[in-house]
Structure formats: structure tokens, C-alpha cells
Amino acid sequence: MKKLILVILGCIFSNMSIGQQVNVEKEIIHDHYYLTKVEGKFGLTDLEGNVIIPNEYESLDFSNGSSGLSVKEGKVGLIDICGKIIIPNIYDKLDFSNGSLGYSLMNGKVGVIDRQGEILIPNEYESIKFDGNVGVSMKNGKYGIVLLTGEIILPNEYSSIELKKDEVIVVKDNKEIFLSREEVFSK
């Protein structure tokens, strides 16, 4: 019986690493926090060592302020420096390089989202190219016009759309149609 207990205890302790040290890398950010890396995962602590964000992210980037892009299980989201998840880690890519509004990519479809997590344009387009607040969108191989507010100005039913200074040129059924910008945007 003693041998059986010793064998069981030996099996238990052989799977445990008593006194094993974990390598913790730290970098001070925003003068009040440590960005930590433990076993390849990133998290955030305050200077006293209190965990704010657990070390469960492949990447955390707070270089643009008090909210940062996070990558978890290969998906991108946005988390604030207090640990509040603003945008869940469900996107393939988020790009806020133009400021407070960003492109989101999910399952090969593009949308627009703001840094507060409000979806302005859902991820249903193959592409969107903006000129100011006006975007030429492509959906199912057809072009349309959408505003940053999400309002659809022209549905995605055109072969091409070109925005000019004073006019919009659309092609539908191989016919080029010239519209004044005022006519398009006063709808």
C-alpha cells in the first residue's frame, strides 16, 4: 500500500515543476502600466503588479492612446487600458490608421467601425474606397455609393462609378451616365 501511494505521489509530482521560474518581460507604457509578456502571451499590469488585462493575447498595441488593438486566437479587437473590451476579437483585421474610424475585415468582407465599437458600415462589401465621407463600395461585383454614416446613396448595381469634382459617372448596362454631385447627394 505504501509503495502504491509513493508511486501515485511520484506521478503527481513528476508532472509538476516545483520552483520553476516563468520568464516575464515588462515594458512601461503611458508611465503607469507594464505591458507584460508571459510565455508568449501579452497582458497589462499597473506598476504595483495588479493585473488589469490577463496575459492571454498574442499581441497588444497601445501605441495610439488609451485603447489598443488586441489579437486573441488570431482575431483582432480593441481593448482599453482599463481592460474593458470595446470591440470583441472577432475581426480578421482592424485598421484605424486614419484616426477614430477604421476599416474592419471579417470573413473577406469590409466594413467601417469607430473606436467606440459602433459599426457604421456592416462587413458586407468586397471593398470600399473613401474620398472624404463618400465611399465607392463594391458588393457582389457591382458598385454603389455609401456615406461614412452608413447611408446608401446609390445601391450596388453599377458596373463602375467614378467620383469627379462636380459630377459622378456611373456605368450601368454598358451605358455611361453623367450625374451632377448635387443630384446624387440630394436624394
Image (cartoon, helix red, strand yellow):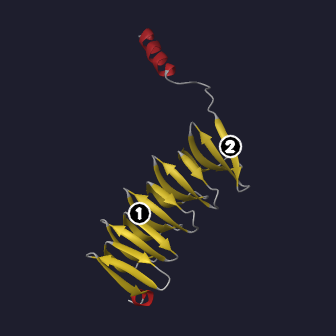
Badge 2 element: strand
Q: Quadrant of residue 183?
A: bottom left
Marks 2 and 1, how far apart at CA: 35 Å
Question: Can you give x and y, in whole percent of width and height, for residue 4 in the image?
Answer: 41, 12
Q: Residue at x 50, y 82 (%)?
A: 165
Answer few, some or many: residues within 10 Å of disc 1's Cα (few below 14, many 20 plus, some between 14 and 19).
Answer: many
Residue 134: percent from left, percent from top: 47, 77
Q: What residue is drawn where x is 45% and y is 10%?
A: 2
Which image quadrant: the N terminus? top left
Residue 125, given in percent of the width and then of the height, sits at: 37, 66
Front in this rendered view, residue 68 or 143 = 143
Mark 2: amino acid: Lys
Label 2 environment density (alpha carbons within 10 Å; few <14, some 14–19, many ≥20):
some
Quadrant in which residue 68 is drawn? bottom right
Asked if residue 77 is positioned above or below residue 184 in the image, the reply reads above
Horizontal and vertical percent position of residue 163: 45, 78
Q: Earlier in the sequence, mark 2 or mark 1?
A: 2
Label placed on residue 7: none
Q: Residue at x 59, y 47 (%)?
A: 43
Please say whether residue 150 is visible from this viewpoint.
no
In the picture of the structure, the residue carrying the numbered disc 1 is 110
In the rendered image, the vertical position of residue 187 relative to residue 7, given as above or below: below
Q: Secondary structure at mark 1?
A: strand
Q: Is residue 56 above or below residue 136?
A: above
Residue type indicated by callout 1: Val
Determine which residue is flagged by label 2.
26
Nearer-the-camera pick, 1 or 50: 50
Indicate which label's residue lies in the foreground, 2 or 1: 1
